[in-house]
Image: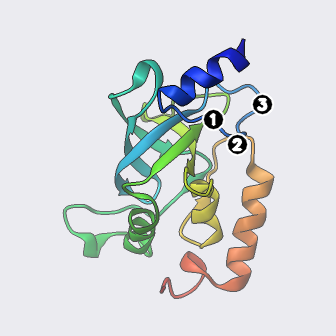
Amino acid sequence: MRAALLPLALLLGCPTAPDLPAGPEPCREQTRVEVLEFIDGDTADVEFLDGGLAGTTDRIRLLGIDTPEIDHDDVLNSDFCAVRAWNEAIEEFQGDTAWLTFDTSCTGVFERTLAYMFRESDELWVNKHMVEQGYARVSTFDFSFRTEFEAAEAEAMAAGRGLWGACAE
């Protein structure tokens, strides 16, 4: 049946979903979005591009990471490295199309949608990138890729990147 749908998806301009990391029992199917705006280094507003949610927007919390908090009223009062983490997310991912994959839970404590995000053009894992560059810590909440993210965090610490250094480019 899936093979019969593939030509229709290509005719309609809907790309076939790549095989990307997700939780063992994801709460939703992966979906494609346009990244409209990053609110901070780990939260973005997106617009769904395909399927039943096409044209709707949602606020996504990047799963497995925690970036420093931005004070939007006075950025000078933001946490150390918050503005740099936010700028990294904006410069690298805002305005791009991306794939979202999910873990076992789709909603966090603040009722935001929890997701892993992958830039569509090169499948760069946004959540992991932020940890690798030192702009995010590994979250204390449960998620399926903790071991992998903790290894990336240890490497960023050892290299003195982002939070673990001067937080310069």
Question: Can the viewer see residue 28?
Answer: no
On screen, residue 104 versus residue 60, left or right, reads: right
Give the alpha-carbon distance from disc 1 to disc 2, as whole Å: 8 Å
Marks 2 and 3: CB-CB under 8 Å? no
Quarter of the image containing the N terminus?
Answer: top right
Front residue (pair 31, 15)? 15
On screen, residue 3 versus residue 101, left or right, reads: right
Give the alpha-carbon distance from disc 2 to disc 3, as whole Å: 12 Å
Question: Can the viewer see residue 114?
Answer: yes
Q: Position of residue 165 (x, y in %)?
A: 57, 85
Q: Residues within 10 Å of mark 3 (few under 14, many from 20)?
A: few
Front residue (pair 106, 119)? 119
Residue ranking furthest to the top: 1
Kind of element beneath mark 1: loop
At 47% from the left and 54% from the top, the residue drawn is 42
Marks 3 and 1: CB-CB under 8 Å? no
Of the residues shown, which amino acid type is indicated by label 3?
Pro
Of the residues shown, which amino acid type is indicated by label 1?
Ala
Vertical side of 34 occupied by 15: above or below? above
* Residue receiving disc 3: 24
Residue 106 is tagged as none
Q: Position of residue 10 (x, y in %)?
A: 56, 30
Q: Name which of mark 3 and mark 1 comes first in the sequence.
A: 1
* Residue receiving disc 2: 20
Of the residues shown, which amino acid type is indicated by label 2?
Leu
Q: Where is residue 152 in the image (x, y as percent from the top left)?
A: 73, 66
Marks 1 and 2: CB-CB under 8 Å? yes
Picture quadrant where residue 34 is located: top left
* Residue receiving disc 1: 17
